[in-house]
Amino acid sequence: MQIHRDWTGLPAGARGASVAMGNFDGVHLGHRAVIEAARQAASAPLGAPLGVVTFEPHPRQFFAPDAPPFRLMNAESRANRLARLGVQHLFELPFGPVLAGLSPEAFAREVLVAGLAVCHVTVGADFVFGKHRAGHVATLHDLGQQLGFGVTTVPLLGAEGHSFSSTAIRRALTEGRPREAERMLGHLHRIEGEVVHGDKRGRQFGWPTANMRMDDLHLPRLGVYAVVVDVLTGPDRLSCQGVASLGVRPMFGRNAPNLEVHLFDFDGDLYGQHLSVGLVEFLRDEARFDSVQVLIDQIAADAEQARAVLAGA
């Protein structure tokens, strides 16, 4: 998959795509339905490449920079997921004052037509665009007729009377229900990022962990999880199971949330490598213990419980 971070100066092979357009935070089942419709539009008779048009940073981050972190995945994780879905071109448009100031018509003319030369645009039924969110799906259909590109609107996908949405997935994760989030995502909720140096207390306790920051990401319920782990880079690329603690480490006075992952049956150096950690099941809340030994005993119990959960998953 090729990633393009502007709508101007594109190579010829990237222009003329059939694109799915939206924020795609989480790349959930509703997003995948939009991408699949764009794929169908890209096939005969168009014979066009399949693209995704999204925005970085997320427009909500631009308009409310001081709001609590809300993203389900960072840009790298989103790109990895879209590549696995067979997207050929990812147009990660820089969202700032220029894009925010374009009217719906100007966005269609300058970005979609003059810049990307799209042949078809597919969006979800709740899609809005342009300055002050003034453009809706009906606006896009009208502009497509005027400017010469096709438009498909995909109805919202859901179950039990509720549509799949990034908001609903965040709620499930906040409440410690990763399996419900998985049903809406169509895949495990994954936290991806680089392994950074920590205090190495886990190794001292006999439970070495890979530490990952949670910067700018929505925080699931703090506590301990059964997880599956993919090591994405480095000499030890593998998939394995593990147990992870997501929290602020109250026994040691830390207050910046991070993810500490213990990989079962693995003994290697992961510093600087990138991991993808899938949350399978919430085991317990984060807690402060009376002593380090009580903590170590609880970690052993958590690991045993995680192994049992993952054996039956």
Image (tube, helix red, strand yellow):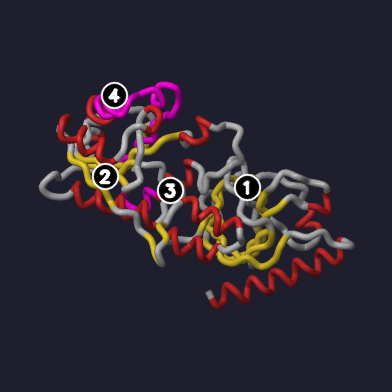
Specify the segment rendered in magenta.
82-109
Type of the residue with mark 2: Thr
Calculate the distance from the C-alpha at mark 2 to the C-alpha at mark 1.
Answer: 37 Å
| Nearest to viewer (mark 2 / mark 1) | 2
Type of the residue with mark 1: Val
Type of the residue with mark 4: Ala
Which residue is pictured at 57% across the width and 64% down the height? 177
Residue 235, given in percent of the width and then of the height, sits at: 54, 52
Residue at the left extreme?
A: 45
| Nearest to viewer (mark 1 / mark 4) | 4
Residue 193, given in percent of the width and then of the height, sits at: 56, 46
Q: Earlier in the sequence, mark 2 or mark 1?
A: 2
Which residue is pictured at 74% across the width and 50% down the height? 248
Q: Say which residue label 3 marks.
A: 80
Calculate the distance from the C-alpha at mark 3 to the C-alpha at mark 4.
Answer: 31 Å
The image quarter containing residue 163 is bottom left
Which residue is pictured at 57% across the width and 57% down the height? 173
| Nearest to viewer (mark 1 / mark 3) | 3
Residue nearest the observer in this picture, 174 or 234: 174
Q: Which mark is residue 122?
A: 2
**Mark 2 Cα-neighbour bin, 10 Å: few <14, some 14–19, many ≥20:** many
Q: Secondary structure at mark 2?
A: strand
Q: Earlier in the sequence, mark 1 or mark 3?
A: 3
